[in-house]
């Protein structure tokens, strides 16, 4: 099966009872955690160092933060994984482990290693709109 123009289908998935594990606690991780907060049952962040916002979210009980380097067992029970470290080789390794274990994964440093793209999201009343630029221009989908 070959697609000349790759585009992603906007699936609106129920993650409210699911576990997301975010590997990395930097700038991009925080932005995505903020977006995920109201959509996902449980969010765990794995990173040896993180931004203040990650610590604050953890103190407020909104996420779990484990201050450590990534190990394969960190994603054993994950339904959804975001590989958002600044170590591209590690992100690819995380991708490989997820594929072997049928876990949905998004690698922020390589759009070819994404089961799904992370969307720009706009919400009002009970409407959720997700934007995706087919990986061609993320600036177009910034909200
Ligand atoms: C393909 C995709 C896959 C995925 O990661 O899911 C992807 C990929 C990449 N982005 C890169 C860079 C940046 N992306 C942003 C911003 C956003 N990127 C987002 C989504 C996506 N980004 C996915 C779908 C894209 C699409 O729809 O077409 C948003 C919507 C959601 C979110 O991330 O929260 C959010 C805007 C929302 C908002 O702001 O509201 C900024 C700006 C900033 O950080 O301030 C920069 C900094 C650089 C700059 O500004 O130029 C790089 C290069 C990394 C490197 O080489 O280092 C790659 C890697 C690659 O292209 O392979
Ligand atoms: N898709 C997108 O929207 C964008 C993606 N990127 C990519 O996202 C990644 C992260 O970017 P930033 O958040 O700006 O980086 P950052 O430098 O702010 O954060 C990196 C994080 O990775 C963690 N980390 C490093 N080694 C680790 C390990 N062994 N185990 C667990 N965590 C580890 C660090 O502790 C830190 O929390 C980069 O790979 C970059 O290429 C960057 C810009 C936008």
Image: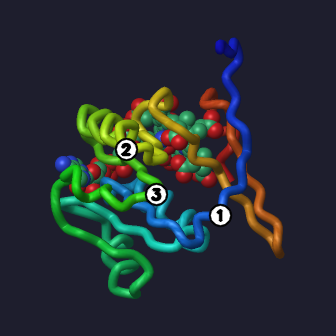
Label tally: 3
Query: Residue 79: which numbered mark, if any?
Result: 3
Front position among marks 1 and 2: 2
**What residue lies at 27% left-to-right and 61% top-to-bottom?**
46
Q: Residue furthest front?
A: 101
Q: Position of residue 61 (x, y in %)?
A: 39, 85
Does any atom of ligand 1 lie closer than 8 Å to the CB of label 3? no
Sequence-first disc among 2 and 3: 3
Q: Quadrant of residue 93?
A: top left
Classify the position of the C terminus by image quarter: bottom right
Which residue position is annotated with label 2?
Answer: 101
78 above or below 100? Answer: below
Which residue position is annotated with label 1?
Answer: 14
Sequence-first disc among 3 and 1: 1
Front position among marks 2 and 3: 2
**Image position of 111 (left or right of 57):** right
52 above or below 120? Answer: below
Q: Position of residue 74 (x, y in %)?
A: 26, 59
Q: Secondary structure at mark 2?
A: loop
């Amino acid at each position: 099966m070959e697609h000349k123009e790759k585009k992603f289908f906007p699936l609106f998935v129920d993650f409210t009872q699911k576990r997301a594990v975010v590997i990395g606690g930097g700038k991009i991780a925080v932005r995505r955690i903020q977006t995920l907060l109201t959509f996902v049952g449980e969010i765990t962040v794995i990173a040896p160092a993180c931004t203040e916002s990650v610590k604050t979210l953890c103190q407020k009980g909104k996420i779990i933060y484990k201050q450590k380097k990534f190990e394969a067992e960190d994603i054993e029970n994950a339904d959804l994984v975001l590989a958002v470290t600044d170590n591209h080789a590690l992100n690819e390794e995380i991708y490989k482990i997820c594929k072997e274990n049928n876990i949905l994964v998004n690698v922020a440093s390589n759009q070819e290693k994404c089961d799904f793209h992370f969307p720009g999201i706009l919400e009002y009343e009970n409407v959720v709109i997700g934007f995706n630029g087919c990986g061609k221009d993320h600036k177009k989908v910034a909200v």
